[in-house]
Amino acid sequence: MVNYYSATLDAVFSALGDPTRRAILARLAHGASRVTELAAPHDMSLPAISKHLRVLETAGLVRKEKDGRVIRCSLEPGPLKDAADWIAHYQRFWDGRLDALADYIERLEE
């Protein structure tokens, strides 16, 4: 379970590390789109966009459906929630540490 979770997080954070992939996910958050629609705002070839989509699909962030010659992509938000939960764990840690520091500074000032 831990290895699966770690591998999933690694894939998600790796996928999110690229601005083109983040832009694709932002577009898909508004609804499913064809690959050509996803490629339109980017100055790159369809094969390059397809590589980005493959990375997103491998990370579980995108689902592709083929209807004849048209490929539609949709957002799969589950792995994003896993990443957000992982970050939230460390946010609670840092919030606690910063609260302790604030208390310490208050005591010094008194």
Image (spheres, rainbow, N blue to C red):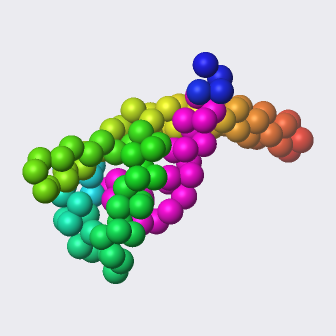
Q: Considering depth in this image, is 109 or 74 the residue closer to the camera? A: 74
Farthest residue, direction right: 108
Seen in the picture, residue 79 relative to 62 is either above or below; the reply is: above
Where residue 69 sits in the image (x, y, percent)?
Answer: 13, 56
Where residue 56 sits in the image (x, y, percent)?
Answer: 42, 50
The image quadrant of residue 60 is: top left
Q: Considering depth in this image, is 103 or 64 the residue closer to the camera? A: 64
Q: Considering depth in this image, is 4 or 93 the residue closer to the camera? A: 4
Farthest residue, direction bottom: 43
Q: Considering depth in this image, is 79 or 1 the residue closer to the camera? A: 1
Tell me: 66 left or right of 109: left
Q: In the image, is residue 15 part of the stretch drawn in magenta?
A: yes
The image quadrant of residue 26 is: bottom left
Q: Residue at x 45, y 36 (%)?
A: 79
Q: Is residue 67 visible?
A: yes
- Dominant secondary structure, magenta: helix
Seen in the picture, residue 96 relative to 44 is either above or below; the reply is: above
Quarter of the image containing the C terminus? top right
Tell me: 8 left or right of 71: right
Please give the range of residues in magenta. 5-26
Seen in the picture, residue 47 relative to 64 is either above or below; the reply is: below
Q: Residue at x 83, y 43 (%)?
A: 105
Q: Residue at x 39, y 46 (%)?
A: 57
Where residue 83 sits in the image (x, y, percent)?
Answer: 52, 38
Farthest residue, direction top: 1
Farthest residue, direction left: 68
Q: Is residue 31 visible?
A: no
Tell me: 35 left or right of 77: left
- All told, the count of numbered labels is 0
Quarter of the image containing the N terminus? top right
Tell me: 69 left or right of 42: left
Q: Residue at x 41, y 61 (%)?
A: 51
